[in-house]
Image: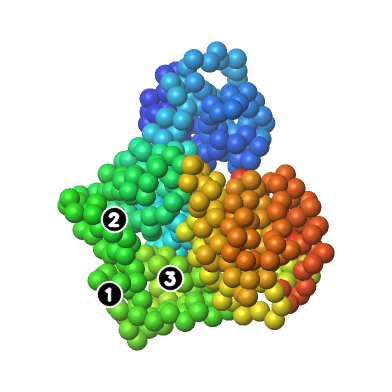
Amino acid sequence: MKMKLAEIAKAINAQNDIEQWKDVEVTSVSFDSRHLDQGSLFVPLQGVQDGHQYVPSAFTNGAVASLWASDHEITDQTHPLLVVNDPLAALQELGKYYLHKINPIVVAVTGSNGKTTTKDMIASILSTQFNVTKTYANFNNEIGVPVTLLNMESNTEAVVVEMGMDRFGQLDFLSKLVNPDIAVITMIGEAHIEFFGTRDKIADAKMEIAHGLKEDGTLVFNGDEPLLEERVKDLTQRQMRFGRQLSNNLYATSVHDEPRQLSFTVNEWPDEEFTIPMVGEYNINNALAAMEVGKILHITPAHMKQALANVELTENRAEWVKGKNGEQILSDVYNSNPTAAKEVLKTIAETPVDGRRIAVLGDMLELGDAAPKLHASLAEEIDHQKIASVYLVGEQMKNLKDKLIQEGYPAEDIHHYAASDLQQLIADLTATLTGEDIVLLKASHGIHLEEVLTALKAE
């Protein structure tokens, strides 16, 4: 990003005269006054605290201008301020303006599981032939999406935008903000079922990603999901399906699950074998979604093969880490829901090991009234013959503990901790783990198992 303050003021309809600062150049945007680059435009957001109180420190740390809400008294006359009704709305409007100015191909990605991994895979594939920007970390909401757009370099040819959702209308807004050329839905699960009640309603909300889809755009979606098939019938845009069923446009014809990677072939290019540096067959669908996007944009299968084999994945998404005792840790601590947890439990249960397989599972959040039943349902994938012991964290995981005991899993191999007892969990794991063991860490981010990962992993 590189814009003069005069251009920004015009784009967001700033209410004050900035003539004396019109030639100030802005090279980035930030809403965190502690972490910004020299040349930043600071955006004071209203949250638990009012971001306006951090404007002075933003200027101290390198900001060259700041937005300012019109209902706040201006106390700083020495720095460039752009007065607007709502700084967040102005940020969004500026993001949309800059997107139109750069005019890249826009790929929007959502889904109950796999959207971050799919985003990373799409970006890797497209990067073989385009200059690509992708959503950083989990910047996937009303704040993160415009920040992603404004972080594009002027030579960006394609932007891959991850879109999260926890209520109706959110994807409608984000989709209309970016007007994607290609929209991707990875799958429908139980994430956020607390707010939606049923998977049908989750599917309704996910379909909002098509509300801003260009008329000549394409919806790429999981064709194995009947809830999506029911909802695409009235769409006029092109539709491309991926999945495991033969009725899809792109499907896997063979899958080889190896200790640290997956290899597979697909119907479209039967003589090519593709590899991803990940475990868990559920990641095949993420790769297929990315490949379908690549196919639409005329990426060669040779480039796709190279890109998938070397994909750079966002941190804390199903990555193997070596522990201090030599144990292998499968860390998936950023988020969790029943579908994802069951899939990764299947993976760990089939991973070769000389020692023990140990599962550390934390509460899955935002499941509402269904939480007790859904936590207990994880017992379907926990066999004592394959997973030697389980360490459970959080109030809801008591339901899984009770279910496991009911089904005959030895009580002495089930360990339960309050979410506030992570230090005890760390101590207990450290005392028992050996270099021959495999450990799974899986929980919603609110349980903070990343603290356990930090304590266990080798320096």
Spatial separation of the CA atoms under disc 1 and disc 3: 15 Å
Q: Is 394 located above or below residue 311 in the figure? A: above
Label drawn at residue 232: none
Quick check: 228 left or right of 151?
Answer: left
* Nearest to the observer: residue 149 or residue 333: 333
Amino acid at pointer 1: Leu
Q: Circle 3: is it few (<14), some (14-19), or many (20+) Cα within 10 Å?
A: many
Secondary element at image label 3: helix
Quick check: 144 left or right of 441?
Answer: left
Mark 1–mark 3 CB contact (< 8 Å): no
* Nearest to the observer: residue 251 or residue 411: 411
Residue 241: x percent and y percent? 28, 64
Amino acid at pointer 3: Ile
Amino acid at pointer 2: Leu
* Nearest to the observer: residue 176 or residue 129: 176
Mark sitting earlier along the chain (2/1): 2
Spatial separation of the CA atoms under disc 2 and disc 1: 17 Å
Q: Circle 1: is it few (<14), some (14-19), or many (20+) Cα within 10 Å?
A: some
Question: Which residue matches tag 3?
Answer: 284
Question: Which residue matches tag 1?
Answer: 246
Residue 146: x percent and y percent? 44, 41
Spatial separation of the CA atoms under disc 2 and disc 3: 19 Å
Secondary element at image label 2: helix
Mark sitting earlier along the chain (2/3): 2
Q: Can residue 449 be spotted in the picture?
A: no
Mark 2–mark 3 CB contact (< 8 Å): no
Label drawn at residue 228: 2
Residue for point 39% across, 81% down:
254
Residue for point 42% across, 30% down:
89
Q: Can residue 164 be spotted in the picture?
A: yes
